[in-house]
Image (cartoon, rainbow, N blue to C red):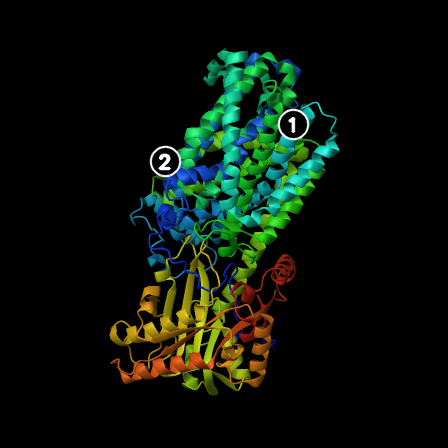
């Protein structure tokens, strides 16, 4: 790798670009499956599921038990204890117990069933869910994004999914108001980031809460196990759980699904037994009348107890956040047919038991288990608690991947764990950070009641934010009237606001943990997005003038040597400032120049046939091209070594298309910058270039593209260190028999010869600093926060899988 460090003056206009946050690996990730229909998760994965003899929705519904519903299904372990914790003993009577059950029943019915299963799951972004999926939908239907890298060509993607253009006047006025006011768009982003931060904070608290609640049953089994021993067992289980994540959601789901199914059947049977044995009259508590009696009797204690009631719906957000791992149909099927009835019967059974055994409130679940079944249930409960943690861990991985792709999270390594189901991922760095924080929480909190306060605040905050974003989706995406969206918003905010208010009162008693974690991650994400946006805007305003390039002539005033130079930049239009530094400081440049922009668009997936946008920057003799490679925020951006070949084929196809299609056939004297054509992978495969493939282990073959003895020796050393790598060599030829214009043939031959001579990757190694005139807060954010994150996250060259031996970096300082 070569590096040139150049520090321009603070006010210089020649400053370089940097790869966008979240833009990762080369676009050589095709899996051989049809991605043309992006509107259906089923269409993407139907043919790939391993259970060919089982209908797809049923197979996915079964797997969803092991990933999505573990958290929700283990709530009966601690809900009643949390509700009556701190409540006066004078309120603990049959009517109060029935009122608590009625609250739980209607909470389960209104929020998980009505809000999520019926409404929220319908707002998927081409099969993807979560707060960022809603934000992505909003950004596509309005100019709400703060990063100005959107192009008109992005709106033509098949997954862009615009609704009808007609909107009512109030909706249109509201949309324009948000688009015009940067402050409102910033607030919208902060709300989304707070929701994402709460999900990540939930990913820390949930495993500790679930496992600790289950293991605490050991003390209920009348053993002499001290509390320290319970915490030690809990920590061992948590370490094993996080160590298992690298296996992937698919394997974890298959492994854990039977546990959750057995658990749900068990708690259903226990609940039914308790109803019949202890108090069948508990059925009348389904009436909301008992909710009014509950609050009339308990007063303010009843309102504070809502912090315990909301624990009955923990894990609900995972149904939406983990949507990309499965499908809306399978998640609905699993909840309605098994999860919901089992939970209702279990909570009803506990209420029946407690109505006759008031002294068992502190350990209601295990005390309600019939004699002789305590140990089997304890084992199943512990296994189910492990599964409960899996739901939020998977959701955390999903939302961080989305944040990363939309330039709201530092670059991290994303491992796709399934070749069949594309939404299933694993992020090693985040996994181990979550494990350390979870262990700290499990050890630091003295009891599960305090831990439940932190748990409930995180859960309800995410739901509150999701309701707000969903109302905006109704207006701008579904194009419903503002009155309908307002009715939805107000109705659910009244219910959720009561729970959120009760949870906020518990901030001093443990709720501060979730709040602190959420604010920390929100600040981290906003700092990264702010720095990325400032740097992009600086690049945008300091582009190299095309008139200046045209004035240099086709030779650019320097020697053009054989080879292809891939100049990486965030810019989708214009020539980055990095190029002017090369031209003015180096005596030679490559014959063929390609300005590559790898960008993420606000859609979950980009079909392979729509991935490449190819254009020309200057007239034909300059041999300068632009390539925009587009990814969705859920796309696999892998490295199979085929990017260079796809790029060459795409450019060759563009050159031939340009010669025959009138919209591209303009005089050579006119700049082509801005004229882009979508080049599909199918068009590349049918290109007129002759392609020959060779698989070779010979290190000499890796040096044929280089005429430098030093580079040859470096490549030879690299090959000796990696003898197991099987290299694929693709050679292109222009067939003599093919009829084409002489200028087109000559350009194609120059392209092929340049490919044979070698390819160099040119990137900016940037240092971002705040201007001297900037405020103290801006200097703190840019010089310390953003710089620290850039130094400690994955470098753009690593994220893009650029060969280190072929990389040239230009060091520059950005004053933003």
Question: Residue at coordinates 59% horizontally, 12% vertically from top-left?
Answer: 356
Q: Point out residue 376 in the picture as x, y percentages from the top left corner.
A: 59, 26
On screen, 516 above or below 108?
below
Which circle marks residue 535 in the picture? none
Residue 662 position by quadrant:
bottom left
Q: Point out residue 449 in the picture as x, y percentages from the top left corner.
A: 65, 29
User: Which residue was labeled with disc 2?
Assistant: 484
Contact (CB < 8 A) between labels 1 and 2?
no
SS class of the residue under badge 2? helix
Where is the N terminus found, in terms of image quarters? bottom right
Please rate how many residues cluster around mark 2, counting C-alpha atoms within 10 Å: few if below 14, some from 14 to 19, many from 20. few
Q: Nearer the viewer, residue 723 or 193?
A: 723
Q: Please report whichever mark, 1 or 2, sits nearer to the chain's N-terminal start.
A: 1
Q: Which mark lies nearer to you, 1 or 2?
A: 1
- The reply, left or right, for residue 753 in relation to residue 721 is left
- The reply, left or right, for residue 467 in relation to residue 457 is left
User: Which residue was labeled with disc 1?
Assistant: 217
Say if residue 620 shows up in the picture. Answer: no
């Amino acid at each position: 790798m070569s590096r040139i460090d150049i520090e321009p003056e603070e006010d210089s206009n020649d400053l370089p670009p940097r790869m966008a946050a979240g833009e990762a690996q080369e676009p050589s990730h095709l899996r051989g499956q049809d991605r043309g229909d992006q509107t259906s998760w089923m269409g993407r994965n139907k043919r790939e599921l391993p259970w060919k003899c089982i209908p797809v929705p049923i197979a996915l519904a079964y797997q969803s038990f092991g990933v999505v519903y573990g958290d929700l299904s283990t709530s009966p372990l601690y809900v009643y204890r949390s509700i009556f914790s701190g409540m006066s003993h004078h309120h603990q009577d049959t009517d109060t117990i029935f009122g608590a059950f009625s609250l739980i029943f209607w909470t389960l019915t209104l929020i998980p069933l009505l809000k999520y299963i019926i409404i929220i799951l319908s707002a998927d972004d081409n099969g993807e869910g979560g707060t960022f999926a809603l934000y992505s939908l909003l950004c596509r239907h309005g100019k709400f994004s703060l990063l100005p890298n959107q192009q008109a060509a992005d709106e033509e993607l098949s997954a862009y999914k615009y609704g009808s253009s007609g909107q009512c006047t109030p909706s249109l006025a509201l949309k324009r108001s948000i688009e015009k006011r940067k402050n409102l768009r910033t607030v919208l982003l902060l709300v989304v980031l707070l929701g994402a931060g709460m999900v990540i904070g939930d990913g820390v608290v949930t495993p500790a809460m679930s496992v600790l609640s289950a293991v605490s049953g050991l003390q209920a089994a009348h053993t002499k196990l001290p509390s320290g021993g319970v915490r030690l067992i809990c920590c061992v289980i948590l370490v094993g759980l996080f160590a298992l994540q690298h296996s992937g959601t698919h394997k974890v789901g298959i492994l854990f699904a039977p546990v959750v199914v057995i658990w749900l059947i068990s708690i259903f049977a226990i609940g039914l037994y308790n109803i019949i044995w202890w108090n069948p009259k508990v059925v009348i508590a389904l009436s909301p009348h008992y909710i009014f009696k509950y609050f009339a009797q308990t007063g303010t204690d009843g309102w504070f107890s809502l912090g315990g009631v909301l624990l009955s719906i923990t894990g609900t957000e995972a149904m939406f956040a983990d949507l990309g791992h499965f499908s809306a149909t399978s998640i609905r099927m699993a909840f309605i047919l098994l999860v919901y009835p089992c939970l209702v019967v279990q909570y009803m059974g506990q209420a029946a038991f407690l109505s006759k055994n008031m002294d068992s409130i502190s350990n209601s679940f295990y005390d309600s288990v019939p004699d002789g079944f305590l140990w089997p249930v304890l084992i199943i409960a512990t296994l189910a608690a492990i599964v409960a943690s899996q739901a939020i861990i998977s959701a955390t991985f999903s939302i961080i991947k989305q944040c990363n792709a939309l330039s709201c999270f530092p670059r991290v390594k994303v491992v796709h764990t399934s070749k069949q189901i594309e939404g299933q991922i694993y992020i090693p760095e985040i996994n181990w950070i979550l494990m350390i924080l979870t262990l700290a929480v499990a050890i630091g909190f003295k009891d599960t009641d305090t831990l439940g306060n932190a748990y409930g605040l995180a859960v309800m905050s995410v739901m509150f934010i999701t309701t707000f974003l969903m109302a905006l989706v109704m207006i701008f995406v579904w194009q419903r009237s503002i009155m309908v969206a307002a009715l939805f918003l107000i109705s659910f905010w009244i219910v959720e606001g009561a729970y959120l208010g009760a949870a906020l009162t518990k901030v001093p008693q443990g709720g501060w943990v979730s709040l602190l974690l959420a604010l920390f991650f929100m600040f981290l994400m906003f700092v990264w997005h702010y720095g990325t946006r400032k740097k992009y805007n600086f690049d945008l305003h300091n582009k190299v003038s095309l008139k200046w390039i045209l004035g240099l002539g086709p030779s650019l005033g320097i020697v053009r040597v054989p080879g292809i130079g891939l100049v990486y930049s965030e810019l989708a239009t214009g020539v980055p400032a990095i190029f002017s530094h090369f031209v003015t400081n180096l005596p030679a440049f490559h014959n063929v120049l390609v300005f590559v922009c790898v960008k993420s668009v606000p859609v979950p997936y980009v079909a392979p046939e729509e991935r490449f946008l190819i254009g020309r920057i200057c007239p034909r003799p300059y041999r300068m091209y632009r390539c925009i490679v587009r990814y969705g925020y859920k796309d696999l951006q892998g490295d199979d070594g085929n990017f260079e070949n796809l790029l060459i084929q795409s450019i060759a196809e563009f050159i031939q298309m340009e010669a025959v299609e009138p919209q591209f056939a303009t005089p050579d004297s006119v700049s082509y910058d801005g004229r882009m054509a979508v080049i599909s992978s199918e068009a590349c495969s049918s290109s007129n270039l002759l392609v020959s493939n060779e698989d070779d282990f010979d290190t000499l073959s890796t040096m044929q593209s280089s005429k430098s003895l030093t580079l040859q020796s470096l490549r030879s050393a690299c090959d000796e260190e990696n003898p197991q790598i099987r290299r694929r060599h693709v050679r292109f030829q222009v067939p003599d028999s093919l009829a084409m214009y002489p200028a087109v043939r000559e350009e194609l031959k120059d392209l092929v010869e340049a490919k044979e001579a070698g390819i160099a990757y040119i990137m900016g190694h940037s240092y971002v600093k705040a201007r001297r005139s900037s405020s103290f807060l801006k200097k703190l954010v840019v010089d310390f926060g953003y710089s620290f994150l850039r130094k400690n996250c994955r470098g753009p060259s690593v994220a893009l899988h650029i060969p280190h031996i072929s990389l040239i970096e230009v060091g520059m300082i950005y004053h933003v």
